[in-house]
C-alpha cells in the first residue's frame, strides 16, 4: 500500500520488512553473546572442577611416594596391590620399579658440572649382559627449549668391553684420550685429531641438536659438561641396532618409580629417582 499523506509516499510493507530484519539481527546478536557467555562459564566451571580433582590426585601421588621410597630403600617385599584406592575416589596405579629410562628422556645439566670430571655421566650397556655390547646404534641430544643458546659440551666415549678394558673401568675419564672418543653423526674422524667433544650450541648448522652413530657391539659412555651459569634442560633419545627403534637407556646406580594418581579423570604423575645406596 502506498501512503501519499503530506505529499510523501512510501511502501508500508517494505518498512515492516526492515523492522523485522532489525529485530532478527538484534536477537542474533543477543544469542551470540549468550552462547559466548555460556561457553566461558562452562570452561570456568570445568576448570574449577579440574582444580579440585587435581588437588586430590597430587596429594594421592605424593602420599604413595613416601610408601614407595620406604619400600625401595628398605628392600622390602612387594606389598603394592594392582591399584590403590585412596579417599575421595583417588586411584593410584601399582608403582613399578624400573632400571631404565624412557626412550625419550628429559633431564637437566646443572652448573656444577662445569668441568669434565664433574660432568653428568650416562653409561650405555645391556643390564642383562654387562660384559657384552650395549645394543645401542644411535644417540640424539637436543635442547628442550629450542630458544636456548647456552653451549653444552658433549663427550661420547665408545669402548670394547670384551677387550683389555672391562666394564666399569674409567676408560672415559680422560677427555684428552682420543682413542675412545667418537664424533657426532656425519663428522670425519682423522686419527689423533678426532674430535673428543662437540658444543651442542651453536653447532655448524645452528640446530641445537646432535646425533652420534654407535657400535651396538661395544659399550658407550656419555659425558655432559655445562660450563655456563645457567641450568640447561636437555632431551636424550637412544635407538636400538636398527637405528630407528627407540631403546631406553639404563639407569646406573638408581631406580625409577613412576606414580600415577587418578581422581575422577584428573591425572597427575610423579617419578621418583632413588639411588641404590
Image (spheres, helix red, strand yellow):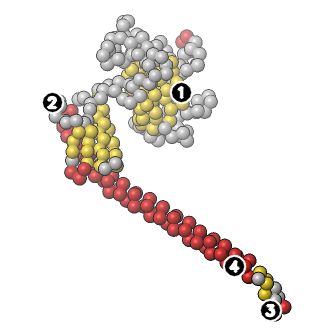
Using the numbered discs, state the Cα–Cα distance from disc 3 to disc 2 in whole angstroms. Answer: 102 Å
Using the numbered discs, state the Cα–Cα distance from disc 2 to disc 1 in whole angstroms. Answer: 43 Å
**Residue nearest the observer in this picture, 141 or 191:** 141
- Expressed as whole percent of the image width and height from the top left, the position of residue 72 reads 21, 33
> Element type at marker 3?
helix
Using the numbered discs, state the Cα–Cα distance from disc 2 to disc 4 in whole angstroms. Answer: 85 Å
**Residue nearest the observer in this picture, 214 or 37:** 37
Disc 1 target residue:
210
- Expressed as whole percent of the image width and height from the top left, the position of residue 218 reads 41, 12
Frontmost of labels 1 and 3 is 3
Disc 3 target residue:
5
> Element type at marker 1?
strand
Residue 219 visible (yes or no): no
Say above or below: 2 vs 261: below
Mark 3 vs 2: CB contact within 8 A: no
Write the residue at 62% across / 75% down: 23
Please tell me which of labels 3 and 2 falls first in the chain.
3
Mark 4 vs 1: CB contact within 8 A: no
Specify few, some or many for label 3: CA neighbours under 10 Å numbering under 14, 14-19, or 20 or more.
few
Please tell me which of labels 3 and 4 falls first in the chain.
3
Specify few, some or many for label 4: CA neighbours under 10 Å numbering under 14, 14-19, or 20 or more.
few
Using the numbered discs, state the Cα–Cα distance from disc 4 to disc 1 in whole angstroms. Answer: 73 Å
Frontmost of labels 4 and 1 is 4
Taking the view exactly as shown, the residue that stands out farthest to the front is 1
Using the numbered discs, state the Cα–Cα distance from disc 1 to disc 3 in whole angstroms. Answer: 88 Å
Frontmost of labels 2 and 1 is 2
Specify few, some or many for label 1: CA neighbours under 10 Å numbering under 14, 14-19, or 20 or more.
some
- Expressed as whole percent of the image width and height from the top left, the position of residue 160 reads 40, 10
> Element type at marker 4?
helix
- Expressed as whole percent of the image width and height from the top left, the position of residue 46 reads 40, 57
Amino acid at each position: 500500500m502506498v501512503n501519499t499523506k503530506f505529499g510523501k509516499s512510501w511502501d508500508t510493507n517494505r518498512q515492516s520488512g526492515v523492522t523485522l530484519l532489525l529485530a532478527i539481527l538484534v536477537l542474533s546478536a543477543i544469542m551470540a553473546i549468550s552462547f559466548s557467555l555460556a561457553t566461558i562459564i562452562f570452561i570456568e566451571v570445568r576448570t574449577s572442577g579440574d582444580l579440585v580433582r587435581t588437588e586430590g590426585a597430587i596429594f594421592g601421588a605424593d602420599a604413595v611416594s613416601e610408601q614407595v621410597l620406604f619400600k625401595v630403600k628398605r628392600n622390602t617385599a612387594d606389598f603394592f596391590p594392582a591399584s590403590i584406592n585412596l579417599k575421595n575416589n583417588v586411584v593410584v596405579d601399582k608403582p613399578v620399579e624400573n632400571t631404565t629410562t624412557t626412550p625419550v628422556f628429559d633431564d637437566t645439566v646443572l652448573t656444577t658440572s662445569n668441568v669434565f670430571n664433574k660432568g653428568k655421566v650416562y653409561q650405555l650397556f645391556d643390564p642383562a649382559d654387562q660384559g657384552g655390547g650395549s645394543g645401542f646404534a644411535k644417540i640424539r641430544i637436543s635442547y628442550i627449549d629450542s630458544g636456548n643458546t647456552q653451549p653444552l659440551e658433549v663427550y661420547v666415549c665408545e669402548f670394547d668391553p670384551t677387550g683389555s678394558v672391562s666394564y666399569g673401568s674409567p676408560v672415559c675419564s680422560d677427555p684428552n684420550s682420543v682413542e675412545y672418543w667418537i664424533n657426532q653423526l656425519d663428522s670425519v674422524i682423522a686419527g689423533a685429531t678426532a674430535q673428543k667433544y662437540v658444543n651442542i650450541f651453536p653447532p655448524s648448522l645452528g640446530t641445537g641438536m646432535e646425533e652420534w652413530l654407535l657400535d651396538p657391539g661395544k659399550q658407550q659412555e656419555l659425558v655432559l659438561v655445562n660450563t655456563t651459569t645457567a641450568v640447561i634442560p636437555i632431551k636424550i633419545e637412544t635407538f636400538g641396532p636398527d637405528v630407528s627403534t627407540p631403546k631406553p637407556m639404563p639407569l646406573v646406580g638408581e631406580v625409577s618409580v613412576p606414580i600415577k594418581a587418578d581422581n575422577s579423570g584428573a591425572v597427575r604423575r610423579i617419578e621418583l629417582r632413588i639411588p641404590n645406596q
